[in-house]
Image: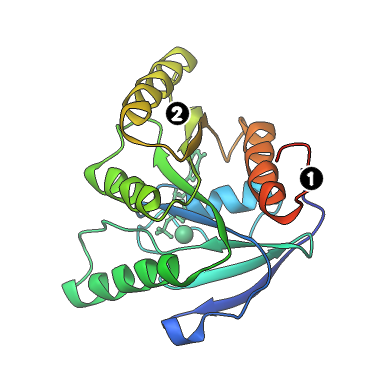
Amino acid sequence: MKIRTAEFIKSVAALNQLPVSKFPEVAFLGRSNVGKSSLINSVCNRKSLAKTSSQPGKTRVINFYKINDNMHFVDLPGYGYAKVPDKIRSGWKQLIEGYLKKSRNLKLGLVITDARHEPTKLDYAMIRWLDFYTIPYGIILTKSDKMPRHKIQLRVTEIEKIIRQQSEHCKAVLSYSSFSNEGKPELLSLIGNAVALTTNTNSPNT
Ligand SMILES: Nc1nc2c(ncn2[C@@H]2O[C@H](COP(=O)(O)OP(=O)(O)OP(=O)(O)O)[C@@H](O)[C@H]2O)c(=O)[nH]1
Ligand SMILES: [Mg+2]
């Protein structure tokens, strides 16, 4: 898959503002500050399509982007950021869970984690959630530029082993760097397959 166009559509702060969409959607999920918005920019070849920050908690709403006029990328607030008041954190949680429950067009979840650390309890909770709702997903270990290649490979293998024992819907565990674009062809192919599988019944992948 090639990304030819990417445009910002809408920010959503409450569930009743979710756009009515006929497009397949790919959701970018993960802890706060892990690099979700940077990953969207890197995949789309754009510097500042999605706003990024070195301060956790930058994305506080759900942002929708239209890709190639035929799918949406959905950038969600990060979960698990301790330094926000409980009330706001539970608001984000409701927004994330509400989106996941309501989106009939969600074709792929990308659970993004920092390659330097093991996935957290919250990441595994998200994975269980995606499994429960039978949503295909990939695990993306980002910031790979900050870690030696062989260590990343070990982590990928480790996670694949754990996931194979507990989950049916994981399509890939990939490493990625939004700085060097390492992993981009593999990620684009994961996205392309997930979307094509569900939009084109004549696809050779079906
Ligand atoms: N070295 C390196 N830094 C990265 C990479 N991706 C993101 N970062 C940095 O990590 C920080 C957070 O990036 P964001 O993309 O804003 O993270 P986010 O997950 O969208 O954060 P929230 O919106 O707060 O949930 C920024 O300082 C980025 O420059 C990467 O692949 N490599
Ligand atoms: Mg963000």
Mark 1: amino acid: Lys
Left or right: where does residue 82 sit relative to residue 201? Answer: left
Quadrant housing residue 120 = top left
Report whether 196 appears left or right of 158: right
Identity of the residue drawn at 65% across and 61% down: 24
Is the CB of mark 1 within 8 Å of ligand 1? no
Q: Please state which of residues 126 and 91 is positioned toward the viewer in this rendering.
A: 126
Colour scheme employed for the rendering of this structure:
rainbow
Along the horizontal axis of the image, is 82 left or right of 95? left
Residue receiving disc 1 = 2
Going from the N terminus, do you reach mark 2 or mark 1 first? 1
Q: Which residue is mark 2?
A: 146
Q: Is residue 180 above or below residue 100?
A: above
Q: Nearer the viewer, residue 6 or 159?
A: 159
Q: Quadrant of the C terminus?
A: top right
Image quarter of the N terminus: top right
User: Height in image: 57 above or below 117?
Assistant: below
- Give the mark count: 2
How dense is the environment of label 2, judged by Cα within 10 Å: few (below 14), some, or many (20 and up)?
few
Q: Is mark 2 within 8 Å of ligand 1?
A: yes
Q: Secondary structure at mark 1?
A: loop
Whether residue 181 appears in this view of the structure is no
In the image, 32: left or right of 24?
Answer: left
Q: Residue at x 68, y 42 (%)?
A: 193
Out of 184 and 70, give the one closest to the viewer: 70
Can you tell which quarter of the image residue 29 is in? bottom left
Decide: is 164 above or below 197: above
